[in-house]
Amino acid sequence: MLVLPACEVERRKSDAELDLNPQQAAGRRVYDDTCARCHEPYSSRGKKGPGLKGVFKQQYLPLSGLPANDERMGEIVRNGRSKMEGFGRVLNDQQIQDLLAYMHTL
């Protein structure tokens, strides 16, 4: 008999379960629409781009060594970096602020 290890897939938690405020919940929707295809939100494992779990809990971004703050991350979202395209023409300033607020919860 062949026994395969169980594949653990974490159920997606609701905004309420994550205790997200309205701005963070709006940012989560932006993340889902623009970031999730390349970045894992709750894992340090990457997809096309690095995982973003705990991105604001570090002083510097792991790959670039740039400061992990709203100003730098907002600039990266707007203008892109390395292989990442910029979203400055897709997202308005409020959407970027909402996104950053959500990313602080990761």
Image (tube, grey):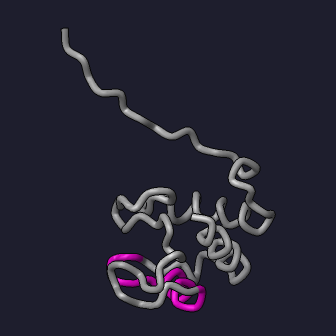
Residue 57 is situated, as x and y percent measured from the top left of the image, at 52, 75
82 magenta-colored: yes
Task: Please name the residue shown 63% across and 65% down the image.
Answer: 30
Q: Quadrant of the N terminus?
A: top left
Farthest residue to the right: give it. Answer: 22
Decide if residue 64 is on the left or right side of residue 27.
Answer: left
Relative to residue 106, is residue 84 drawn left or right?
left
Residue 58: where, in percent of width, then height? 47, 79
Q: Position of residue 2 (x, y in %)?
A: 20, 14
Count of marks, rendered view: 0
Would residue 60 be found to the left or right of residue 2 on screen?
A: right
Q: Where 41 falls versus 65 (above or below)?
A: above
Side of 20 where 88 appears, left or right: left
Q: Is residue 39 magenta?
A: no
Query: Magenta part of the protein: which range?
Result: 70-84
Question: How far across and how far down the image is residue 7, in percent?
Answer: 37, 32
What's the residue at 53%, 83% (across, down)? 73
Tell me: residue 102, above or below residue 71. Answer: above
